[in-house]
Image (spheres, coloured by chain):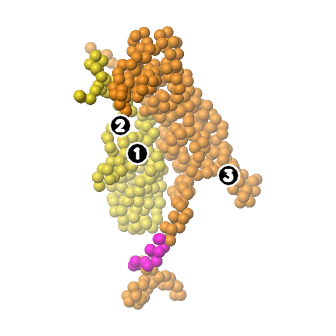
Chain colours: A yellow, B orange
Amino acid sequence: MTSRGTPSRFLQSVLQNGVGRYVCQLKRISIIFSKNAQSSLGVREFIEEGVVDYAKTNPGTVVYVSPNTSRIPKIVAEYLNGNVREEEVTSKSSKQILELINTLTNQSGLDVIRLRKPFHTDSPSIQGQWHPFTNRAPSIGPIRPLP
Amino acid sequence: MASGYIVNRGALTLGIHYRNVCRTTTFTQIREKKRWMKSYAYTMERKRKIEGTPPPKPRSQKPNWDYHAEVQAFTCRLHENFSLELLKTAFVNPCYIESEQKRRQDLGMDSETIALVLKGNIELRSQGSDFTSSFLNDWCRASFPRLHSDGVAAVVAHLTCSTVVCHVARNLGIEDLTMSAEFPIPDDVLQSTLMAVIGALLESSGAERAGFFLRDFLATQLIGKDLFDMWTVVNPMGLLMEELAQKNMSAPEPRLIRSAGASTVLPLYFVGLYSDKKLLAQGPGDTVIAAEEEAARVALRDLYGFTENRRPSDFSTMKQQHEPVQYVASN
């Protein structure tokens, strides 16, 4: 779809994160998988090998592991600003799931939609924004439309 | 799958799937398109339209919730060392204690056998809010040394007002951990919970760490804000004259500097304020009076050091502040 048909937002951070201290925005991650289905093979391998290391390196994120009889394994990530992101990890390998979880950890919870500008500033002008009267000698006369 | 699955002749002829649970019971399963599904879906939709969307549930009542783990993650996430007992006390609000006691009484439990061993956060809350206002006052005076005392009070009042504090609390994940009587949590309860958390931090780690916490989360809310959004000044010209009188400069004289489109729907006037024939500030406006007031505000912003292009406040980390940078001179 076009940029006008899909939602868009400006570049921002949650609570000026990073200006003071950096706070990891991912507050909890729930891994929902099946004990027997073949689509959750990668998830089961990840839980055997990688999830404990991940939880140790990210002490600010709570990791929940919940087996149920769903055929589609999911990872549900909840962020500090309230957004919840669900990712389906059917038939992914353990490495791919680790990469996905690292991506989710490094994101802020803001929507993954088009960014209107890749920059943002609170002080756009240091010397004062130009307007037609800047550096215009008063002797020239007022600004008028052409006769 | 199960060894007791017996395929009935009906499966091949009628297309119905049986499973004999035991000799006398069968479980019938329809794997094709279900004829009742459409009317069921429409009925549920009508029910939802009549009753409205279901009320929001607190996170603690949804699946996957471990309070102790969440509280520990909260401390690690903010890079702070809280004493967990104090922090858990900070999250307990008095309205929650009352509602819990009432619920136990309604259920008919003896108050002696099952006593509610929960302390409220009233003390921590008052400590936290006192420390917050004193720290923010000191920080504002240090960051903006030329700002008028009314201005400092207005800035601190803005930073401790319920909108800003609740915005900060919601984006720090305090709403999930708070124990309160109602859900969604009302603003004043959330504000008092954040103040109690600050009080708990004060008791656990000391004033310096609590100060850094306040600076990193509350003082950063000043970024991008204009002084006169937070401080309503009715008569900026009068205030400017007082300030100049204190500095022994002569009173400001307004002069019309530029004008454009005076006879149109959108006139523009630039008025400059001169003190001792030197330009203090100039400001634009629709009418000459509006332009003069705007010029007075621009002059005040300059005097107080709260312009948009000022040097940003120092939010560097604690380590960087403790180790002063050593410059190596090179010829």
Measuring 52% from the left and 19% from the top, which residue is drawn there?
B238
- Magenta residues span B31-42
Q: Position of residue B184 (x, y in %)?
A: 57, 51
Tell me the CA gap for discs 1 and 3: 36 Å
Q: Which chain does the residue under circle 2 lie in?
A: A
Q: Specify few, some or many for label 2: CA neighbours under 10 Å numbering under 14, 14-19, or 20 or more.
A: few
Question: In the rendered view of the protein, which quadrant contains the N terminus of chain B?
Answer: bottom left
Query: Is residue B47 inside the magenta stretch?
Result: no
Q: Which chain does the residue under circle 1 lie in?
A: A
Q: Earlier in the sequence, mark 1 or mark 2?
A: 1
Measuring 39% from the left and 85% from the top, which residue is drawn there?
B15
Instruction: State left or right for residue B274 relative to residue B158.
Output: left
Q: Amino acid at mark 3?
A: Ser
Measuring 24% from the left and 28% from the top, which residue is drawn there?
A146
Measuring 36% from the left and 28% from the top, which residue is drawn there?
B263
User: Pointer 2: what residue?
Assistant: A120
User: Pointer 3: what residue?
Assistant: B99
- Circle count: 3
Query: Is residue B34 inside the magenta stretch?
Result: yes
Secondary structure of residue under mark 1: loop
Q: Nearer the viewer, residue B95 or B148?
A: B148
User: Pointer 1: what residue?
Assistant: A108
Q: Quadrant of residue A89?
A: bottom left
